Amino acid sequence: MSKKILLSGVKPTGAPHIGNYFGAMKQFVDLQKDYEGYVFIADYHALNFIQNKDEMEKNIVGVLLDYLAIGLDPKKLTIFKQSDISEHTELAWIFDTLTTMPYLMHAHAFKDAEAKNKEICVGTFNYPMLMAADILLYGPDIVPIGADQKQHVEIARDTAEKFNRIFGETFKLPEPMIMKDMAVVPGIDGKKMSKSYNNHIPLFAEYEEIKRCVMNIVTDSGEGIPKNVYAIHNLFRPASELLPIYESKAGKYKELKEMLIEDIEKFIAPMREKRKEFAKDIPKALKILKEGGEKAKIIASKKMEVVREKVGVKVYEK
Ligand code: AMP
């Protein structure tokens, strides 16, 4: 029996944080042996945020090293870069022609940008269409993501349904896979952990950086159990172990934070060291990415052939 398909991606917009890891990336590793996996670097999505050649290049290599360091195995799944597969943008265009502006105006990313009075580029507005194409080209059964991306997978489902309705059955409807306990990993201020809120703990932080982040976790002097410290600590230890410790040390914030620093360091240090090893041979890492792209291209181009035929633009064999 053929394996079920998993697909997900990360934007190369800077170093990942532990929210990205527990919310999404860890699932890629945990599931890689049971699924046919496609994990990509969403560089064309990142172009909405990063418009600087050197930074983009550095970030792409960065996500590749992150993927390898957390334990993604190119023998088990396909690691590739979105921009290597031109079918993503081609299919996004076709979806653009089927989707109305009012529908996309409901997307969170657009509404957030609008609420902040930001000047919104067309790429940000169309983001969900490119993401629908990223997903639907590979026919995944599951898309492991954090809760913030749930709406985008729903939009991909709606888009697949609309295309199927107009042109006939073509796309499988994907399911988001959101880990209940990790749906929204909180940052050091208790809000969703996010680079843009600057409330994050980098996944590959050095000891001193971990210490600085943890010491900055916001605590309220009225609390017995400092809830923001506990919420982050709970990512690294189960409640059954943690609660008795926090109860016995109620009010002793400094001690609890010191313990959290040690737990994070113990968890991060081996991955951090692995990343440094992979970084010693960038050409070898890039070869993995290039070969992954060649594999993904085969799947994506076959699917696009079907799509072109369905919409009526394939009038001869290539
Ligand atoms: P990004 O590439 O920044 O969109 O994020 C990569 C993945 O991390 C996506 O699946 C996000 O849903 C997930 N993610 C980002 N922030 C968090 C968070 N604070 N908690 C849980 N998952 C998150």
Image: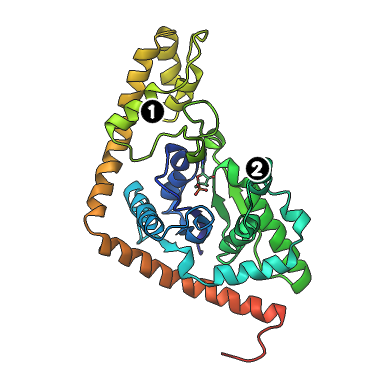
Q: Report x, y in % for residue 69.
A: 32, 49
Give me the residue at 36% from left, 49% from top: 66
The residue lying toward the viewer, choosing from 238 and 133, is 133
Mark nearer the N terminus (2 vs 1)? 2
- Depth check, mark 2 against mark 1: the one in front is 2
The residue that disc 1 covers is: 213
Image quarter of the C terminus = bottom right
Given the image, on which type of amino acid does mark 2 rest?
Answer: Asp
In this view, 5 is above or below 210 = below
Q: Name the residue that disc number 2 marks.
A: 112
Mark number, residue 234: none
Q: Quadrant of residue 259?
A: top left
| Amino acid found under the numbered disc labelled 1 | Cys
Q: Residue at the bottom extreme? A: 316
- Asked if residue 140 is positioned above or below residue 246 in the image, the reply reads below
Q: Is residue 95 left or right of residue 48?
A: right
Q: Quadrant of residue 111?
A: top right
| Along the viewing direction, whichever of 119 and 170 lies nearer the viewer | 119
Secondary element at tag 1 = helix
Residue labelled 2 has its Cβ within 8 Å of some atom of ligand 1: no
CA neighbours of label 1 inside 10 A, class few (<14), some (14 to 19), many (20+): some
Give residue 275's position: percent from left, percent from top: 28, 48
